[in-house]
Image: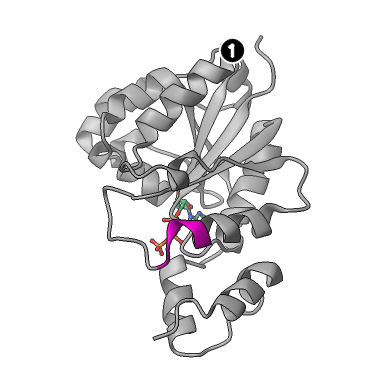
């Protein structure tokens, strides 16, 4: 058996919200993670340029996770001027972690898009994957894109205990409280001048107000 795994959550966090926070918190509990490291993306290569600068997104994540002793922030992607690839971040973290299990956390939507990621098959060599699903909806490989099913079906585990049997290579789903919050929705609400209170932490909302972010 290996030591308790380190969870990793990446994203643009443009801005960070309670959907992200509950994903990390519920994964920590359900998957037995010792801690969760937050890794805001710098220049995400797969998607549109983030609406606000990396330094702001990093600061919002810092404010969102402050006070949770199990959460920490990794600023390497946001302080680099190279495109952020998850595989290169995982290579760095694997070199630091030795044999300790790493669990890359993501929502089911992100998981199904995995074949579009740079060198995606190598992710399985570097970390486990923890996928947040809706309660009652198990991960079923016959509903995945064919190449993901081919590479990942044999890796699927039904129990979080498998995450401690190896440093990397397994896929485990966990039920998450459904929260239909997205950063896109928040950006639209902020641009329209609508209230976003109770959708993200107050310190993040106050930062957005003070810095006048996401206004049209
Ligand atoms: P956008 O609306 O701009 O696409 P987003 O809110 O989906 O952004 P990302 O930074 O793209 O946020 O997401 C980072 C990770 O958080 C992804 O793995 C995504 O699946 C997950 N995630 C985002 N929102 C939720 C949510 N409401 N519930 C569960 N997981 C979420």
Q: Nearer the viewer, residue 189 or 180?
A: 189
Question: In x, y percent, where is residue 51?
Answer: 38, 68
Name the residue that disc number 1 marks.
165
Q: Residue at x 39, y 23 (%)?
A: 124
Look at the magenta stretch and give its main secondary structure.
helix
Determine whether 187 is above or below 82 in the image: below
Provide the secondary structure element on which disc 1 rests. loop
Specify whether 109 is left or right of 28: left
Q: Residue at x 62, y 74 (%)?
A: 205
Residue 192 lies in the magenta-colored region: no
Quadrant the N terminus occupies: top right
Q: Quadrant of residue 125?
A: top left
In the image, the segment drawn in magenta is 52-56
Any part of residue 165 in sight = yes
Quadrant the C terminus occupies: bottom left
Determine whether 190 is above or below 174 in the image: below
Residue 54 lies in the magenta-colored region: yes
Q: Nearer the viewer, residue 162 or 16?
A: 16
Q: Residue at x 76, y 48 (%)?
A: 68
Specify whether 152 is left or right of 160: left
Specify whether 163 is left or right of 215: right
Q: Nearer the viewer, residue 16 or 153?
A: 16
Name of the residue lying farthest toward the left: 146
Question: In x, y percent, where is residue 173?
Answer: 51, 37
Question: In x, y percent, where is residue 142?
Answer: 29, 36
Q: Quadrant of residue 71?
A: top right
Question: In x, y percent, where is residue 129?
Answer: 47, 31
């Amino acid at each position: 058996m290996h030591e308790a795994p380190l969870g990793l959550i990446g994203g643009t966090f443009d801005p960070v919200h309670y959907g992200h926070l509950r994903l990390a918190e519920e994964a920590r509990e359900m998957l037995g993670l010792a801690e969760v490291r937050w890794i805001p993306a710098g220049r995400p290569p797969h998607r549109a340029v983030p609406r606000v600068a990396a330094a702001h997104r990093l600061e919002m994540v810092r404010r969102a996770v402050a006070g949770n002793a199990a959460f920490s922030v990794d600023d390497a992607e946001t302080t680099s001027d190279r495109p952020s690839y998850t595989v290169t971040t995982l290579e760095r973290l694997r070199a630091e972690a030795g044999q300790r299990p790493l669990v890359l956390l993501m929502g089911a939507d992100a998981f199904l898009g995995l074949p579009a990621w740079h060198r995606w098959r190598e992710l399985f060599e570097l970390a486990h994957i923890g996928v947040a699903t809706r309660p009652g909806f198990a991960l079923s490989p016959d509903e995945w894109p064919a190449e993901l099913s081919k590479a990942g079906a044999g890796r699927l585990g039904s129990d979080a205990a498998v995450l401690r049997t190896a440093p990397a290579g397994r896929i485990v789903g966990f039920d998450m409280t459904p929260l239909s919050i997205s950063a896109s929705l928040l950006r639209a609400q902020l641009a329209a001048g609508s209230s976003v209170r109770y959708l993200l932490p107050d310190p993040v909302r106050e930062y957005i107000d003070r810095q006048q972010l996401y206004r049209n």
